[in-house]
Amino acid sequence: MLKKRLMGVVTVKNGWAVQSFGYQRYLPLGKPECLVENLNRWGADEILVQVIDASTKGLGPDFKLLEKISQLGLETPLVYAGGIRNLEDAVKVIQMGADRLVVDALLHANLGEVIQISQRLGAQAVIASLPLSWSGQELLWFNYLKGQLHPFPESLLNLMHSETISEVFLCDYLHEGQERGFETALVDHFPNPKVPLIAFGGLSSAPQLQDLLSRTQISAVAIGHFLTYLEHALQAYKEALFGMPIRPSKYETRFSLLSHVNT
Amino acid sequence: MKVITVGVIDYGMGNQASVIHALRGLGFRVRMSANISELEQTEILILPGVGAFPSAMQKLHQLDLVSYLQEKARKHDPIIGICLGMQLFASLSHEYGLTAGLDLIPGEVLPSSQAKWHIGWNTFESVSDDPLFKASDGQTFYFNHSFYFQGPREYHIAVTRHVQPFVSAIRRNKVVGVQFHPEKSQSAGRELLKNLIVGLIDA
């Protein structure tokens, strides 16, 4: 049976991993590769590295960071987001060790390029990031490059309908970084009931994760800095989610504890 | 103990970096190349792959690797295909029209009629007595694909269930394909990769 996933998210700004509050205030957490290494060691189901200033500064993907992460020899699937401008960027991101990639700014700038990426790499490798808010009446899509809100556009519905992307990274950007802040109305009112959703933003408590994971459309839940302050936080979440369709937690080491014991 | 040298085929369609790091972490020596004379200096080949079947076959043709891989398989030299690499072993694929594959293991690559994608961790159920896979029965591995192998039962090593059961590992002589990513499947993947490389060379 296909398991639902707990995805660990590392948010990067100015080259540093940051704790983000609604993508407006940031606290530095350290080197991104160190956080990625921890998530790998703890047995995250997937790791997302999102470089949030790559598109706003027009920098393109952070290949230097990908190179550093590649040197870690990750054994956990890696998803990369940030600055992907075209097919060439996307192919290079995959060649440098990412298993999948996330597009966001490109959804506003050039849908044709998203289609090309999907045709070359396969739709299973392409995730659409949608920063959304709920007005109380309708879903609104946030263009963070322009700071503008838009009604959910027909073009995105067509993109999902045409199966150009395999999953939506549904980001509650307003409540990102806020404990138990995630707005479930974003899932309830999502206009395409078939596309698998990865919920992100303000996910911190086990009951909240349990509620989301019990919904058919949710394929994964993504957790950011709430994983950062506690050793083995990911295993603790998994243990609290016992009975849900997820991989059980593992505490593993490559080194036998008995190997240094003289008998 | 002699260090095994593994050749990773560099045809521009893979997450080669992950595969190479996983292999080095297991203690193997790795050569990544598309050059036949360099690949010939290795003991086992790995064909990784992320992407669409037609583009991948086009790249293999451009690099003159199609007949080389077919000859290696005929000589019973060991080859492991990962994800798209496994699908390329098939006779043909229906992805974006019909494309002939390497035809190392008879079969076709088809879209699922029920679930468009299969992304995430799922269970490996052994359906053969192949000793190389024995330790992996019941383990979970990371999958990320939208097309599926269908071929004669005699080549099936394992199945995985996603709506319907599908073939997740195949073998013909010393050509082995896995639909999942052992290099990204943590301890279960490490164990399988090591068992396959050592076992196929010793077989």
Image (tube, coloured by chain):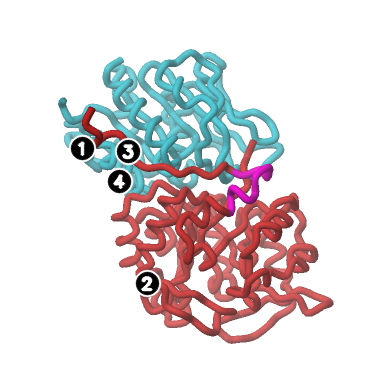
Chain colours: A red, B cyan
Looking at the rendered structure, the secondary structure element under dot 2 is strand
**Mark 3 or 2, closer to the camera:** 3
Mark 3 → mark 4, Cα distance in angstroms: 24 Å
Instruction: Answer yes or no: are tags 1 and 3 on the same subunit.
Output: no
Kindly identify which numbered label has been placed on residue B174.
none
State which quadrant residue B164 falls in.
top right
Instruction: Answer yes or no: are tags 2 and 1 on the same subunit.
Output: no
Q: Badge 2: how crowded within 10 Å, few (<14), some, or many (20+)?
A: some
Q: Are marks 3 and 2 in contact (CB under 8 Å)?
A: no
Q: Amino acid at mark 4?
A: His
Q: Amino acid at mark 2?
A: Gly
Q: Is residue A82 visible?
A: no
Q: Amino acid at mark 3?
A: Leu
Q: Can you identify the residue that label 2 sits on?
A: A30
Q: Badge 3: how crowded within 10 Å, few (<14), some, or many (20+)?
A: few
**Mark 1 or 3, closer to the camera:** 3
Mark 1 → mark 4, Cα distance in angstroms: 10 Å
Instruction: Answer yes or no: are tags 3 and 4 on the same subunit.
Output: no
The percent coordinates of residue A195 (x first, y second) are 70, 55
